[in-house]
Image (spheres, rainbow, N blue to C red):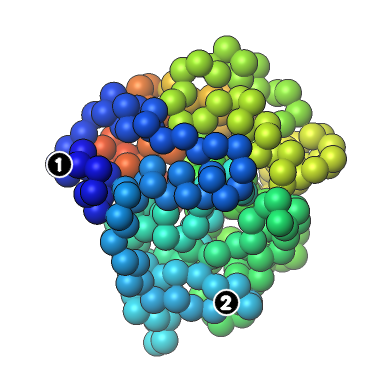
Amino acid sequence: MHPNSHLPFTGQVSYSEVTERAATIDLGDTPASMRKGFERLLLGENPLSDDRPIIQLGAVEARISGLENLDGYQGRVWIWFHGGGYVFGSPETHIRPTSAFAKTTGCPVVTPRYRLAPEHKWPAQLDDAIAVAQALQQQGYEVALVGDSAGGHLAINTALVLAKAGTPAARLALFSPNTDRAGYNPTRAQRDAFDPIVGDAFDVMLAKMCFGDTSVSDPQCSPVLGDLSLLPPTHIEVGGTELLRDDSLVFYAFAKRAGAQITLYETPKAFHMWQVWGPWLKEGVESLERAASKTE
């Protein structure tokens, strides 16, 4: 990769090449450095301008992929909640997976600019997510939810709130969701050295920035403890080498026990959030396509 390239890669890449790139980026320990570092990691040193339209939904700004606007559109709208531990990430950092998901599903995808921690503690993020979902539902759209990592956590919480309100989401797609801080994931510590994208101590630090002193047994903090019988039809994509692998496996088991309609696919060599590296990482593209097909 040339240091002044607009994009992180050209052509097809492997897991090892992504791992090598990730190792060159130090996210630091402040929110400002994390935000800049994460942007460099996903978009390169000189990111191209994001020309996707900006819309307002429930007083929350969002980027839209797949359409210029929703005027005259009838059908399903996906809401993608971006990952980044609730501290970094943005609609812009997720331009590639959200645009690809819109193309694959044939539906528009909106990516909210929900408020970030530590400036805004939980449940500010959930409040923004619910505002966007309800605004779309009130306009008559069928709403489906998707998220990666912390965004997967947010998508689960949003789905449960909407279900309790009697306005359930149509579908739920989860990429490496963070579901458990209460200790039900039995292999988190052992997997700490395997995942090149996120480590245990870093993940715990991000959670502290967002949730403060909220109990880890609070279902909003650990949605594996929520009423999972309320989930809409759900599909999970998880990597075999990632720190949060068993967050997905335990969540899947608890949801099945609760009677939810849920499927899970594990990609053995994948690490955390590998979908964001499409179109260069073919396994990331395959994961997005598989999730789209499972949630039609």
Residue 281 appearing in the image: yes
Q: In the rendered image, which residue does mark 2 sit on?
A: 57
Residue 160 shown left or right of residue 24 in the figure: right
Q: Which residue is drawn at 64% across and 56% down?
A: 116
User: What label sits on residue 11 in the rendered view?
Assistant: 1
Residue 33 shown left or right of residue 271 in the figure: right
Quadrant location of the C terminus in the rendered image? bottom left
- Provide residue 29's location: percent of width, then percent of height: 60, 37
Label 2 neighbour load within 10 Å: few <14, some 14-19, many 20+: some
Closer to the camera, 259 or 44?
44
Q: In this view, does 186 lie above or below 5?
A: above
Q: In this view, does 107 lie above or below 195?
A: below
First along the sequence among labels 2 and 1: 1
Q: Is residue 38 above or below residue 185?
A: below
Closer to the camera, 146 or 68?
68
Residue 271 shown left or right of residue 61 in the figure: left
Q: Is residue 199 above or below residue 67?
A: above
- Provide residue 221's location: percent of width, then percent of height: 74, 42
Residue 176 shown left or right of residue 228 in the figure: left
Closer to the camera, 58 or 230?
58
Q: Which amino acid does label 2 sit on?
A: Leu
Residue 147 appearing in the image: no
Q: Residue at x 55, y 37 (%)?
A: 28
Instruction: Write down the quadrant of residue 249 in the picture.
Output: top right
